[in-house]
Image: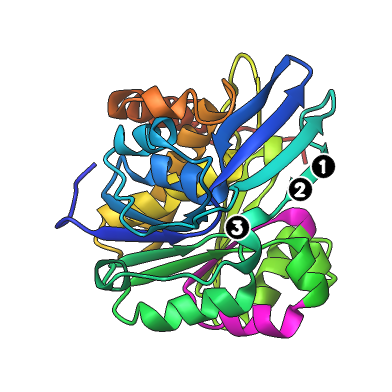
Amino acid sequence: MEYAEPMSVTVVGSIAFDAVQTPHGGRERMLGGAAVHFSLAASFFDEVRVVGPVGDDFGEPEYAVLHGRDVNTDDIEHVAGGKTFFWKGVYHENMNSRDTLETDLNVFEHFDPKLSQASKDCDVLFLANIFPALQLNVRKQCEQARFVALDSMDLWVNIAREALVAAISAVDCVILNDSEVALFTGEREVVAGARKIMEHGPSAMVVKLGKYGAALVTADESFWIPAFPVDFVTDPTGAGDSFAGGFVGCIAAHGGEATLETLKLAMAYGTAVASYNVEEFGTERVARLTGPEIVERVHELRSITAFETPEVALKA
């Protein structure tokens, strides 16, 4: 991959502790949150600054994971006397669906992002899943960002649609899963739904399809990539945010220029990072991941999806 001049990436979102149970085991307390998973993935491509709140229970072991990937944590807000966002869930046998057992917003409940000038001056911005009005506020503060992507969830579609539309209209790319696209648009087909969302302003949409991969949709084209066929899925938690980190990070590595070819390549890098994420619990695998491992898996993806197209004699 050819790298452009160094870019700075800012991500705003949740920093959390997760408790998960899957058919293959569990963890009672592990580092998580959208901003964490995104940061670790994006850190392979460029400088990353993470913005989010934590409580007194977030300490050196957690910072060490982020610092181990050279993630800049200067804008992590420590709320004295508070507790870090906590989520607990259980995955079903197919690993594509889960039940939330407990959600304690804690310091995240009153999160009002505070960005240093360095974070505001980012070249690339990722607005992880937070209240849409906050996403728009952050977007307005990062005036010089060359590429901005946004994630959201069904809750905001249901209770804050107008604010979500306003936020979507201010970004270049929206990343949602297929059920969120259907809920937002009423369209069951991925491409039709994605293009309906793009009518609000974004030039591209990424639709996450879980274990089936992801789709990239632009005004004129669509591109589909399968999930990498890992031997064993241990824990899907954070896979979507790891995908986003690889996707956005790759675009940052190309100077923030989201050409169609760069977007396609970014889909492959996002898929590769996410495939490592699911192999172990939480951040465990990505925290010790290496760049050459990611590149190797991108080449494998290319190999398993490429084929020659000679003519075949067909019956009339």
Q: Closest to the observer: 229 or 274?
A: 274
Look at mark 1 in the image and give the residue it sits on: 100
Rendered residue at 50%/74% (across/down): 203
Choose top left, top right, bottom left or bottom right for residue 222.
Answer: bottom right
Rendered residue at 77%/29% (across/down): 95
Query: Marks 2 and 1, Cα distance to the nearest angstrom?
Result: 7 Å
Q: Closest to the observer: 31 or 220?
A: 31
Choose top left, top right, bottom left or bottom right for residue 280.
Answer: top right
Secondary element under disc 1, as helix, strand or loop, is: strand
Query: Marks 3 and 1, Cα distance to the nearest angstrom?
Result: 19 Å
Secondary element under disc 2, as helix, strand or loop, is: strand
Look at mark 2 in the image and give the residue it sits on: 103
- Amino acid type at mark 3: Val
Asked whether residue 177 is in view, the answer is: yes
State the image coordinates of residue 62 (x, y, percent, origin top left): 44, 35
Tell me which numbered mark, 3 or 1, is placed earlier along the sequence. 1
- Local packing at callout 2 (Cα closer than 10 Å; few below 14, some 14-19, many 20+) is few
Secondary element under disc 3, as helix, strand or loop, is: helix
Per the rendering, the mark at residue 107 is: 3
